[in-house]
Amino acid sequence: KYITKDGQVLEDVSSVKDNAPVGEDYTTEEKSFDGYHFVGMAKTSDPATGLVAEGTKHVIYVYEKDVTPEVKHGNVDVTYVAEDGTVLEATSDVVKDGEIGSDYTTTEKKF
């Protein structure tokens, strides 16, 4: 069985061996699920590989949802001002809600 840390089932119970003789080897495997990464076996899990015993063994793989990094954004604006503080051209947006580290360009103007 493949589950998330909070108990969500990624892949339900599937049988590895049915009515196998006691002492026969069994093997299960870690699987990949988009958006999740393997963190370990459940505390109540039987080993991933081993020998068949009387009754039923339950192998439980546990996964955690991948964390999507937060993308930070910023703004760039430009205002043209004379040395005496007179606004030559009002503030205008150059970049609105742009990704941090992305390029921007402003231009020198003649007034």
Image (cartoon, grey):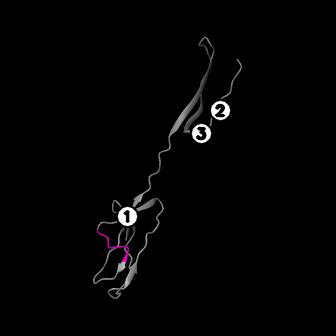
Q: Secondary structure at mark 2?
A: loop
Measure how far apart labels 1 and 2 are at the Cα level.
Answer: 49 Å
Q: Position of residue 98 (x, y in %)?
A: 56, 38
Residue 37 is inside the magenta segment:
no
Q: Secondary structure at mark 3?
A: loop
Tell which of 56 and 111 is nearer to you: 56
Describe residue 30's horizontal placement relative to residue 43 as left or right.
right
Q: Is residue 3 above or below residue 25?
A: above
Within-10-Å neighbours for mark 2: few <14, some 14–19, many 20+? few
Judged by depth in the image, the label closer to the viewer, 1 or 2, is 1
The tag earlier along the polypeptide, 3 or 1, is 1
User: Which residue is at a point 56% across and 35% down the rendered structure image?
Assistant: 96
Residue type at mark 1: give it.
Gly
Task: Please give the label number shown on residue 40.
Answer: 1
Q: Is residue 77 above or below residue 44?
A: above
Within-10-Å neighbours for mark 3: few <14, some 14–19, many 20+? few
The reply to whether discs 2 and 3 touch (Cβ–Cβ < 8 Å) is no
Judged by depth in the image, the label closer to the viewer, 3 or 1, is 1
Residue furthest right in the image? 110
Task: Please give the label number shown on residue 102.
Answer: 3
Task: Please give the label number shown on residue 105.
Answer: 2
Residue type at mark 2: give it.
Thr
Q: Position of residue 90 (x, y in %)?
A: 60, 21
Residue type at mark 3: give it.
Ser
Q: Is residue 16 visible?
A: no
Magenta part of the chain: 44-49
Secondary structure mostly seen in the magenta stretch: loop
User: Which residue is at a point 44% across and 60% down the rendered structure image?
Assistant: 36
Residue furthest top in the image? 84
Q: Quadrant of the C terminus?
A: top right
Q: Quadrant of residue 109?
A: top right
Q: Is residue 72 visible?
A: yes
